[in-house]
Image (cartoon, rainbow, N blue to C red):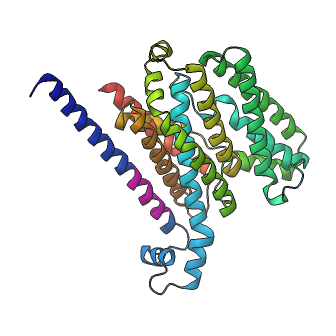
Amino acid sequence: MTAVEAILAEQSRRSQRRVLLVALLGLGALASVLLDLVSGPSGLPLEQVLGALTGVGEVPKAAEVIVWQVRLPVAVMALLVGASLSLSGAEMQTVLDNPLAEPFTLGISASAALGAGVAIVLGLAIPGIPALWSVSANAFLFALLALGLLQLASALRGGGSEVVILLGIAVNFTAAALLALVQFVASPDALQQLVFWTMGSLVNARWEGIAVLALVLAACLPFSLAASWRLTALRLGADQARGFGLDVAHLRRWTLVRVSLLAAASVSMVGVIGFVGLAGPHIARMAVGEDHRFLLPASLFTGALLMSLASVASKLLVPGILLPVGIVTSLVGLPVFFALVLRREAR
C-alpha cells in the first residue's frame, strides 16, 4: 500500500467512525424521548406508551390522553428546542471564532424576554394574534428586531466577528436594562408570570408551537448542512478561508441569520434555555472533531439528547414538582460540561 492509499484508508476509517458516532447520538436522542414519555407522576409503563403511539393493542383511554395531549408535546418540543439551540451554537462558535459563543451571545434571549415582558406586563401585543400566542409572538418579533438591528449595524461596520460580538453584547445589555424597567413597573402577578417565563419551561408546549419550530428548523437545516464545508474552512481562520475563495462576510451574515431564527423560534416557545447552545456543540466536537459535515448533525442530536434528559430530570429531581427546564439545564448540565472540558484538557 502506498502512502497516499494509507492516508485515504485512514481517512475512510475516521469518516466511518464519525458516521457511527452521529448515528449513535441520533439513537440516543430517540431513546431519551421514550424515557421522557414514560417518566412522570402517572408512571405509565413502556408498553402502554408504545401502544398509545402506535395504536397496537388495548390501551386505556386515560393513557392515550396522557401520552398524546400531555407528554408527547413536551417531549417533541424538548427535542426540537435542544436540536435548534445546539445547531445554532455550533455555527455561532465557528463564524465568530469564539468557543464561548452561543445563540444568546447576540442578545436574542434578552430581546425575546423583553418582548415577552411587554406582552405580559404592559399588555402590548401584535394586532390580530390570539391572546394565547401573544407572548410567544412578541418574543419572536423582538428577537427578529434585535437580529435586524444587529445585521444593519454589522453591515455598516464591516461585519467582522469582533464587531458582531460587541454589538451583540450591546443589544444584550440594552434589552436587559429595558426588561428590568418593565419588571420595575409590573404588578406582583405579572412579575411572577414574567419571571417564570424567563426560567424556561416546557409546560405550555402545544402542537401549533411545535409545528412552527419544526418548520423553522426544517427550513434552516438544509442550508446549514450545505454550508458545512465552508464552515470547516472558516474554522481554519478567516484569512485561510478567503484563500480558498470564500466570501467570509457573506457566509458569516447568512449563518447569523439562521442562528438568530433558530434561537428566536426556540426562546419564543419555551422561554430562556441556557447551557444547551453552549455545551451541545462542545460535546459533539469532542466526539467527531471539527469537520462540520459531522459536527453539525452531531451537535443537533447532542442538543436534542441534552434537552430531553433535562426534561426527564425536571420531573424527577423533586418528586411531585415540575421544575422549569431552564433551571435544570444549568444546575445539572453545567457540572457535566465542566467535567468533560477538564477531562479533555487532561488528555
- In the image, the segment drawn in magenta is 26-36
The reply to whether residue 96 is visible in this rendering is: yes
Q: Position of residue 195 (x, y in %)?
A: 75, 46
267 over 286 or under it: above or below: below
Which residue is rendered at x = 79% and y = 51% of the image? 135
Q: Position of residue 199 (x, y in %)?
A: 68, 46
332 over 170 or under it: above or below: below
Residue 98, magenta (yes or no): no
Q: Position of residue 311 (x, y in %)?
A: 54, 55
Q: Main secondary structure of the magenta part?
A: helix
66 or 2, which is in the foreground? 2
234 or 195, which is in the foreground? 234
Q: Image check: 346 left or right of 303?
A: left
Count the marks: 0
The reply to whether residue 320 is visible in this rendering is: no
22 or 276, which is in the foreground? 22
Residue 28, magenta (yes or no): yes
- Quadrant the N terminus occupies: top left
Q: Image check: 143 left or right of 81?
A: right
> Which of the 4 image quadrants contains residue 148?
top right
268 over 252 or under it: above or below: below
Outermost residue, left side = 1
Q: Position of residue 19 (x, y in %)?
A: 32, 44
> Which of the 4 image quadrants contains residue 315?
bottom right
Q: Image check: 340 left or right of 260?
A: left
Outermost residue, front side = 245
- Quadrant the C terminus occupies: top left
Which residue is rendered at x = 45% and y = 37% of the image? 337
Which residue is rendered at x = 46% and y = 39% of the image? 296
